[in-house]
Amino acid sequence: MGDAGRKAELFEQLARVGKALGSGKRLELVDLLAQCPRSVADLAAAAGLGLTTASAHLQALKQAGLVATTREGTTIRYRLADSDVAALYAHLRSVAAARLPDVDAALRGYLGKFDRGEDTEQIDRDELLRRVRAGEAIVLDVRPTPEYAAGHIPGAMSIPVNELPGRLDELPVDATIVAYCRGPYCVFAYEAVRLLAAHGHRAARLADGMLEWRLAGQPVETAAA
């Protein structure tokens, strides 16, 4: 029989990853880093954290090998350590949604007026690709510009959702506009589709977002920020 102490140590090491992800705010930071590398200040602002608290959470993720850093001058930028971390996060999210009814209740509470998007058309990746190939749709990325620059669906236009009201005239009126954002827990695409529809555009929302697009092995373009 194996050494019980060494077996226990093995499982303690495995548990370090679970412990690092055992915080809602740390999961939110992983969600943000799945879009693009960011500085501590950017992450703190996006997650509603103080700099010290954000740094502590990031150090916990780094100690578990889930994030890595690069230095750009005096700025340290964090990124996910590899694509397997993004896949782990996506799988954790799926398991939680499937096993915990409270996740669905929390999602409904978060989406609020966007709950389920029942008043907007939702399409999957295959349908998006079909429409684009047929010349029936324009793809619109409504995430912040740095996220678009780090990676986007090929051919997608970039208009961050907060800029969309003032840039509607840049969009064609003779094709369906398919908006996408970070993923199913992001409200940007919901907001964009409702705004577009209210101004007479045919609009639909991609069912998932850039994280799922990458994990599905779909092509990704980058652009200079």
Image (cartoon, rainbow, N blue to C red):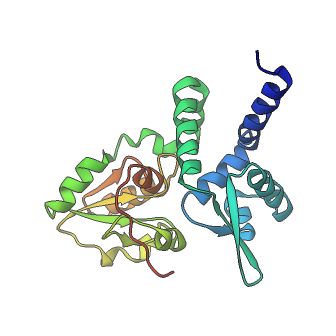
Task: Please name the residue shown 58% across and 56% down the image.
Answer: 82
- Residue 134 coordinates in the image, percent (x, y): 13, 60
Residue 201 position within the rendered picture, expressed as x and y whole percent measured from the top left: 26, 63
Which quadrant of the view contains residue 70? bottom right
Query: Which residue is painted at 68% across and 52% down in the image?
Result: 66
Q: Is residue 55 above or below residue 212?
A: below
Taking the image as shown, residue 176 lies to the left or right of residue 86, namely: left
Residue in view at x 58 percent, y 37 percent? 92
Q: Is residue 136 visible?
A: no
Q: Position of residue 118 (x, y in %)?
A: 36, 40
Q: Residue furthest left?
A: 134
Taking the spot 81% from the left edge, 61% from the top edge, the residue there is: 55
Identify the image quadrant of residue 222: bottom left
The quarter holding residue 174 reads bottom left
Q: Nearer the viewer, residue 166 or 102?
A: 102
**Between 32 and 75, the one nearer to me in the picture:** 75
Q: Quadrant of the N terminus?
A: top right
Q: Residue furthest front?
A: 1
Counting from the top left corner in percent of width and height, residue 39 is at 70, 70
Q: Is residue 217 visible?
A: yes
- Position of 223 with respect to 107 (left or right) is left
Side of 49 where 160 appears, left or right: left
In the depicted structure, whether residue 123 falls above or below residue 14: below
Direction from residue 74 to residue 190 in the image, left or right: left
Residue lying at the far bottom in this picture: please name it: 73
Q: Nearer the viewer, residue 68 or 39?
A: 68
